[in-house]
Image (cartoon, grey):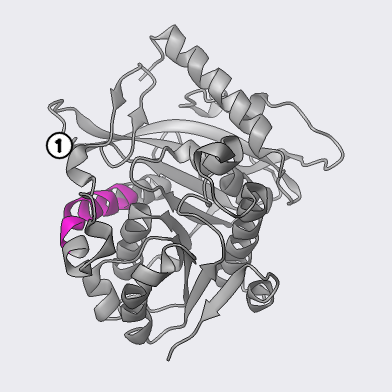
Amino acid sequence: MKFSNVPVLLFLICYSSSLLTQVDRIPPTGLYRPGYSLVEWTDSSRTQFKSTRKMPRTLVVHIHYPAEQQKDVSSKGPTSVYLEKHLNSKSALQLDLHPSIINMPVVLFSPGRGTPGNQYTSLARELASHGYFVVTVDMPEIGMVVYSDGTTIHPTDSFRPPPGMMSGPYEKVDSFFIEPTDIGTQDLRFVLQKLNDKNDDDTFFEGRLNLNKIGIFGHSLGGRIGGNLAAIDKAVGAYISMEGIPPRDVRYEGKIPFPITMLCSSGTWPYARENYWSLIENSDAVVYMVELKDFGHNSVTDGPVLSPESYGYAVDPIEAIALIRQITLAYFDERLRDKKGFDEVLRSSEKIILHHRQ
């Protein structure tokens, strides 16, 4: 797809510039300047599911990566790297991958229902500055997707839980989310296929990724989707989720074979506790159950940083996203790079309450 709608392009550029200015109040801490690419990948074997538009299922994919220019912590640097241009060829890249980096660990981001992928910019840029290749997937009808030609597909109401459902009983919640979980899992598997495709013209990252042990970060419904993929794809070696719990069969049958991290706000913990215990008690691997005091459901996103008055969480939004970045980086470093230090991070803040197997 090509841009044919100039107002849409101008909106995306202005929005992205504003977003970057705000989230860089907490700039990336790694050695590398994050690069950015926005691509559209079409799975011709499937169509959009609920929409009346019977178009092939096309995903909008945000890619953050360690760029060629080393990050200078003393300089603000230009913001043009983050403008949301659709980059569909090697020549269109604004910044090259850093030449010294090979075998990059890959992290898939699975957004929450209705949450655009660019709302996870701060977290994605932080990981990219530390040498990660971060792929955030906008899924049609699960989230809002805006294509390069101006076509917009909104989240379907079919996947919006009715009032009161999320407070239980949880069997109904599990049943309600079966369909979007299956759809989202297929989306993530298709993205992994694209990352593995050596014959794709868009693969500026060809030969530079470690796809044998990938990580997943999921939020809300995206956490359920990510947990499902972690249970069925042997290439997944790390999974962390914010307020998104794996499907029922994954929890009760202990299907994720490696240590995972579950983040939960203090507001959600009281009514979600039993469901988290169903995961913890049936897992043979370690489950790091992290309650975050004063956090909210969307503290993992840039929303509260951009518009704190719209959320009203007790925690300072910059403090919240900074702590989630620290936890996430330490977890992926331990799981994907065999670096120690995750336990130390979990003991580093009074905002963290660890719940252990009873």
Q: Name the amino acid, label 1.
A: Lys
Q: Residues within 10 Å of mark 1 (few under 14, many from 20)?
A: some
Of residues 184 and 197, the one drawn nearer to the viewer in this rendering: 184
Which residue is disc 1 drawn over? 50
Please identify the dominant SS of the magenta region.
helix
Residue 55 magenta: no
* Left/right of residue 274 with respect to residue 161 in the rendered view: right
Rendering quarter of residue 65: top right
Residues 339 and 152: in front is 152
Q: Outermost residue, right direction?
A: 74
Among the 4 quarters of the image, the one containing residue 33? top right
Quadrant of the drawing holding the N terminus: top left
- What are the residue bounds of the magenta stretch? 175-189
Q: Residue at x 38, y 58 (%)?
A: 223
Give the x, y percent position of residue 83: 58, 24
Magenta highlight on residue 181? yes
Choose between 337 and 239: the one closer to the eye.
239
